[in-house]
Each structure stands twice: as structure tokens, then as C-alpha cells.
Amino acid sequence: MAARAVGALLVCLAAQPAFAATRLVYWSMWNEAEPQAKALKTIIGRYEKANPGVTFQVVWNGRQNQTKVRGAIAAGSQIDLVDQDADQIAAGLVREGQAFPLNALFDGKAPGDAAPLRTILMPGTAELFAKDGKFYQAPYIYNTVNFWYNKEALTQIGAAVPQSWEDLLLMCQKAQAKKLDGLAIESNVASYNALYFSYLLERLQGSGAISKILDDKSGAAWADPAVLAAAGMERELWDKKCISADARGFQYPQGQQTIAMGETVAELVGSWLPTELADSAGKDFAWGSFPFPTVKGGAGKSTDLQAALLSFVVLKNSKNTTQAIDFLKFVLSEASQKTIAEAGNVGVTRQGVKWPGALASAYLQASKATALTPLVGGMQTKLPDFYATIFEPLHNQMFLGQITPESFVKTLQAKTREYWNAHAAGQPIAQNQRSAAK
């Protein structure tokens, strides 16, 4: 089926006028041996075959790609295409004014399509990082952020898939009765642990709650009762033994390995988890996923999701923007997206393209999303330095029980005021250079 689709695509492209001799320079976040890189190599080969005038120069930089790109730009290097975690791009190259607008991409059609791309991608993905009516990112890989669980363990403890916060606590209670842990965490991966807070606040106040709080430079918004309520509910997970007390000492990937070993039921993390645990869990492991539960009386829906997308950008200093955008249409075509999903074992952003078996439930969640926010509600995107230097370490202290929820809230208010006062005084604050491994 996929072979026929590729063949039809190449026939379609053969009728298009070829570009004049062009070399597209692409710097990638993948290491060359990774499955995702191999999928992209295949796609590049097909594109070059369909467009004989275009060749690629690819630099496989790995996860520090954006940092290396910045240095190359400063040195005057010409780069056409870059890919990276979408939240990092938004907080980096886009914020710094280095990205070329891609409205022509989303208003245009991928090979073989009858409708514009913006109507064909998964709900909210095209718009998630739009800025002032302009689109700067072409998201091509979709990681959902939800609970990943062992279906056999859930059956073993006699629990249903949680729909509400109370259901989640009940699942933990039933796990304890069978001498299992309900939830796994990594004490030293603060970005994972912060997902609990951001999701709880979004379930209490609705999608976009984090962004609204960050707009208040006085720090007073952190005094909203919902903030303390979210922190208190996180502590409830420990008080009710949803998380093993031993987990306070877990160092990545120690926590997630307890899921593979059948000792823990679920973990709140991105959809890269089944791939990371493929060897230890085995090919017959029964993966399932469910969205973050609703909260009683809250404004947020279970269909409001956080998403960790991976995107391409075209750099504004590119001399080949037309050709680069044409290639991105090819990347987002049905045939190319199938190649990425199958060879890379990942979710993709195009509707109707089947995700790998372990991610089937995540595809359903993504296809029904009513609202999207980036990781941690967009905090890493909107104020990356505040998130990295203030929120993330402070939250992890509270999450692991080193400070109280009340102290967490009060300190956030004070630190927010200090942060904005420092900005007003022109003091430099370090930027977040989080390195993702997805």
C-alpha cells in the first residue's frame, strides 16, 4: 500500500517543472544512525529523484542542533533548513527573528492533496506556534503527552482507565492492594515532573492557564487559589502512595524501567516512552495511554492536550526559500509521513496516517484534541529562562517534598517579581538550552 502511494506521488511530481540547480543545506537534530534520520534520508532521496535540479547537504548534529546552528549563523554560514523540538525553536530561532514565515506552506497543498495543508494536519498543530498571524514552523513529528500504562497491569489490579482525578487515585489504591505502584517518576527529570502541575492547572482553569499567569509581571497571579490547589493535588499523589517513596531517589531511566518490569502501572510522559522501553519491555508488551484526567469543577477538558512536536524551520537568510518550502510540502505529504511513522516508529502530524501499534491510542487522542498547548503549558516557550532557572528547580523541590505547596507558591510570587525587576534593570539571565531525547 505504502509502495503504491510513493509510486503515485513520484509520478505526480515528475509532471512538475524542475527547479534550477539548487543545493539545500539542512542541519538536523537527529544522529545519522537513528531511525528518524534514516526515514528522512529516504524522503530526501525520493525528493531529489523527483526534482533532479535539487541536491541536499545534510549535517546530522544531534540534540544540540539549534545551539550549533546559532554559532554557524553568527559565523555567516548559509543554512536553509533546521529541525528541532518545536518548543525549543519557538523560544530560540523564532524568538530571535531567524525564521522565515511559512504561510505559503500551510496555504499550499502537499503533492497529491486537494486541500491546503493547514486543513490536513492534526488539530491545532499548524497553529500551535503561530505568531502574529504568521507560521514559522512546519511540525512533522507528533509526541503526545499523557499517561502511558501497561494494559496487563491495569487488568491485573481490576481498574478501569481513569477518566477523573478520583479515578486516578482509585487506580493507585487498587495497585497497592496488588503490591504494585500506581505511578512512576524520575526524581531528576524535573521537566517530566512539572507536567503534573501544568496539566492540573489547565484542568482546573482551562487550556492556556499557564500563559495567562506568566503575563502578570507582578507575581500576583501565582496567588490564585488554583495554583495552590494544583500543587496540593500533586502532594496528594505521594500522601496516598500513588508514587513509591523510593522514587524520590530514582535517576532516569530507573523509574520508567519499573513499568517495563511490571512493577508500576503508568507514567506521565511523552509518547517516546514505548520506543525508549522497547528492548526492556519486549515486543509483546501491551501498551496503552490515556489523557490527563479531568478535575471536578474544573474548566479544562480531557481532550485539551499538551503536545511535544518536532518541527522544521526555514532560516530567513536562506537563498532558497521557495525550494525549501516545496521540500517541506513533500515531507508533509501522505507518503512521506507514512515513511516517518513506520521507519521512525513515531507519531506524525498528518491526519489519517496510521501511527505505530503501541501509539494507536495516542493517535485517537491527538485526532480529537480540542486545544493544544506546548510542554508544561508553554512555559518553556514563553519564558524559557524563567522556567529553567526558577520554576523547574523550585517545582521539583515541592514535588519531591522538600518544600511545602504554600512555600512553593509564595516563593514563585517573590521570584517572579525579582525576575522582572532584573529584566527592567538590564541584568542578563541565562537562556534555557534544554536538550530533548525523543
Image: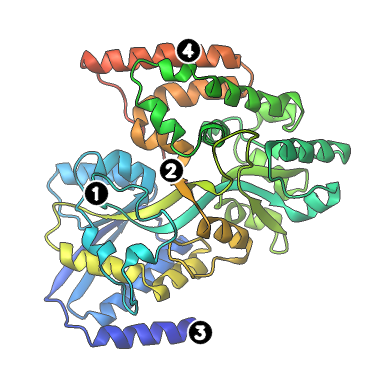
Mark closest to the chain's N terminus, 2 or 4: 2
- Which mark is nearer the camera, 1 or 4? 1
Query: In the drawing, does residue 6 fall left or right of residue 206?
Result: left
**Quarter holding residue 107:** bottom left
Cα distance, mark 1 to mark 2?
18 Å
Please name the residue that numbered disc 2 is placed on.
374
- Which mark is nearer the camera, 1 or 2? 1
* Camera-nearest residue between 241 and 48: 241
Name the mark on residue 158: none
At horizontal 53% and vertical 31% (from top left) the residue drawn is 190
**Is 255 rendered above or below residue 21?**
above
> Element under label 1?
loop
Question: Given the image, on which type of amino acid does mark 1 rest?
Answer: Gly
At horizontal 34% and vertical 80% (from top left) the residue drawn is 112
Mark closest to the chain's N terminus, 1 or 3: 3
Please name the residue that numbered disc 1 is placed on.
133
**Quarter holding residue 173:** top right
Cα distance, mark 1 to mark 4?
36 Å
Question: Given the image, on which type of amino acid does mark 3 rest?
Answer: Met
Residue neighbourhood size for the residue with mark 1, other residues' Cα within 10 Å, grouped as few (<14), some (14–19), many (≥20): few
Measured from the top left, where is residue 82 in percent x and y?
Answer: 28, 54
Please name the residue that numbered disc 4 is placed on.
411
> Element under label 4?
helix
Measured from the top left, where is residue 114 in percent x and y?
Answer: 33, 77
Q: Is residue 57 visible?
A: no
Please name the residue that numbered disc 3 is placed on.
1
Q: How many marks?
A: 4
> Element under label 3?
loop
Residue neighbourhood size for the residue with mark 3, other residues' Cα within 10 Å, grouped as few (<14), some (14–19), many (≥20): few
